[in-house]
Image (cartoon, grey):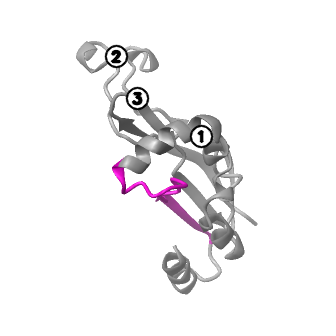
Amino acid sequence: MKVILEQAEKQFENIPVIIAGDMNTNTFDGSIPSESARMYEIFKSETDRINAPEKYESLFKLVESNGYDYKAPNLPGKITRRKSIDGKGDLRMNIDWFFVKGMSCSEPAVAQTIFARSELPGLEGMEESEGRQISDHNAISGNFRIKD
C-alpha cells in the first residue's frame, strides 16, 4: 500500500483520490488453509476483527497518515468476503475498502452477491440461480463528492 500511496501522491498531487478494492485486511495470514479454519472459530468471539480491523492491521494508520479517510466511506462491521471452511460454513471477513482523499462520502453500502430474485422486482425465470454465489466478495458502494 505504501507504494500505491506514493504513486498516487506523485500522479495526482492536489486532486481528490479514491483508492478502492480488496485490501486483504484479513487480520491473519489468509494464505494458510489451516489458519483460515482456526480463525473461523476465533472470529466468533473476537468480533473486532470485523468491526475494528484497524486494531490488527497497520494499513489503516498508514492511509490516515497520508491524508486518506476510511471511516466515512465504509460501513462499520461490513461483510465483504466469504471464505468457505470445510465442514463449518463461511468465514466472513471485512476486507474491501474505500480510502478517500479530498472527497466526502455519504450512503456507504454493501450489495450482497448471493443471487436473490426477491431483490430484483419484475425478474422472470432464473429460479435455478436462487441462492447461488455470484462472487466471493460483496460489492461496496457510496456517493462521493469532491470537497470544495
Q: Residue 132, percent across and down?
A: 31, 25
**Residue 125 numbered mark, or none:** none
Circle 2 residue: 123
- Image height of 117 relative to 86, above or below: above
Q: Residue 8, percent across and down?
A: 53, 78
Q: Say what amino acid the circle numbered 2 marks.
A: Leu
Circle 1 residue: 78
Discs 3/1, front: 3
Mark closer to the chain start, 3 or 1: 1
Residue 36 visible in the shown view: yes
Q: Say what amino acid the circle numbered 1 marks.
A: Lys
Which residue is rendered at x = 29% and y = 13% of the image?
A: 124
Which residue is rendered at x = 32% and y = 18% of the image?
A: 130
On screen, residue 145 versus residue 113, left or right, reads right
Circle 3 residue: 88
On screen, residue 48 versus residue 131, left or right, reads right
Mark closer to the chain start, 2 or 3: 3
Which residue is rendered at x = 55% and y = 55% of the image?
A: 27
Magenta range is 16-33
Which structural element holds mark 1? loop
Q: From the viewer's side, name the closer residue of 46 and 138.
A: 46
